[in-house]
Amino acid sequence: MSKLLNSIAGWGVNIAIAMTALRTNLMRSILTTLGVMIGVFSVILAVAVGNGAQVSVTQQIATLGSNMAIVVPQPDSGSGPPRSTDRGRLTERDGRAILRQVSGVSAVAPQIRSSVQLVTPGRSATTQATGATPEYGIVSNVAASEGRFLTDGDVGAAARVVVIGQTVADKLFADANPVGETVRINRVPFKVIGLLESKGSNLGNDNDDQIVVPITTLRQRLQTTAMQGPDDVTLLFVGFEDEDSLLTGQREIKRMLRDRYRVPKGRISPFTVRTTTEIAETTGQVTQIFQAVLVAIASISLLVGGIGIMNIMLVSVTERTREIGLRMALGAKRSDIRNQFLVEAAVLCVIGGAIGLTLAILAAAIFQQVADFPAPVGLDTALMSVAFSAIIGIVFGGYPAIRASRLSPIEALRSE
């Protein structure tokens, strides 16, 4: 027990000596910590931005819905840009066939998308219109917070009704309740029957800047580009009962579409079928690579800061050679001298790391407020940054500390 107390007391003395030495050369100490401070600041901010990108991607995918496959009429793979002859024709009949023949499918939501202009007295907005069926709300977890969503009757009658997102409502109606109001879409009058639940924004994409109309209405009145057939669609959202059925269902959809369109064996499929799980995994890998690159670049600052610590500690050893000789003459062991300079280097780095951590947290908060982009700094990241700062001090302060401990007491005392 006494040995432990003596050891703690010895480290306490080393810390006190280190703080005294830092105060004695205050300006030099401040300039020395700048390298570590900037390095820790850069690394933590890079980690925070990378984590924020992962959070945003996860939220973005969550807005699409869970256990869902997306079917798009374009080549599944292949080199070079897709040709018009490579593209498949995706129809509502294909959606009904998928619902009948593929196991585990809970709903299929065919969609047509087009850019439209909305006008109310004194206001206008341009947004994306999604022509859909009531199943779109089921598969994509979309619902109306005010009014109602589309019904089969709206689709069957090609009714001129629209459900608008919160951003569109703010642009056209300000703070007023838009439900029941009339808006002209591409000069065609529509009645607003509902206000979509807010989905927020991710990675600069505003999920509330959209409107939903019956698919038949968009095809007959609002579609700006001609499609090959009367029931062609832009894409299909296919909802599944669970994740297991999603994995098997993806393969069944690919096989069924190849059979329906008689795609020869060995030829590229004209359809792409992607699941939300695949999208999440792919984007997660991309953001991890992005984060790793940022951290690697930012770590260069830490390396420069560590070299600066080593340089200053070598200068400190040279300046305090006589002090080292005197301590050795009074009975200090070589390990005491070594630990003294190691502690001094570690304290320098911990102070710089703590300041860099504080600045990074403030910068992340400001970035989140200004850019509306999450940049979380977790407790584990904060603790690791401070610990890593201490390790940098020990590693880069190791050589100067060992050099100081190997000085000859007699030669050190003769030093001027």
Image (cartoon, grey):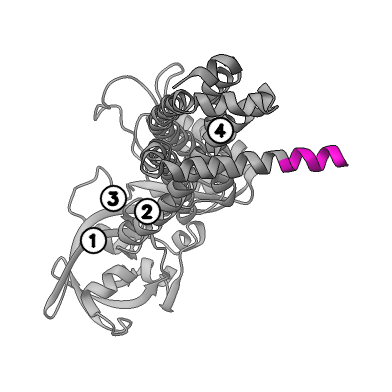
Q: Position of residue 93 (x, y in %)?
A: 42, 47
CA gap, disc 1 and disc 2 = 33 Å
Q: Which residue is mark 1?
A: 127
Q: Quadrant of the N terminus?
A: top right
Residue 248: image quadrant is top right
- Which residue position holds label 2? 363
Q: Which mark is residue 230?
A: 3
The mark closer to the camera, 4 or 2, is 2
Q: Tell me the mark number nearer the camera, choosing from 3 and 2.
A: 2
Instruction: Give the SS element for disc 4.
Output: helix
Indicate the amino acid at tag 4.
Arg
Magenta stretch? Answer: 1-9
Q: Earlier in the sequence, mark 4 or mark 3?
A: 3
Whether residue 236 appears in magenta in the rendering, the answer is no
Q: Earlier in the sequence, mark 3 or mark 1?
A: 1
Amino acid type, mark 1: Thr
Neighbour class for label 2 at 10 Å: few (<14), some, many (≥20)?
A: some
Q: Is residue 138 left or right of residue 270?
A: right
Q: Secondary structure at mark 2?
A: helix
- Which comes sooner in the sequence, label 1 or label 2? 1
Image location of residue 118, percent across then percent down:
18, 69
Q: Residue at x 46, y 69 (%)?
A: 143
User: Which label is found at residue 251?
Assistant: 4
Residue 14 is situated, as x and y percent measured from the top left of the image, at 63, 38
Q: Mark 4 touching mark 3, by CB under 8 A?
A: no
Amino acid at dot 2: Ala
Labels 3 and 2 touching (C-beta < 8 A): no
Image location (x, y in percent) of residue 271: 40, 33
Q: CA distance from mark 3 to mark 1?
A: 24 Å
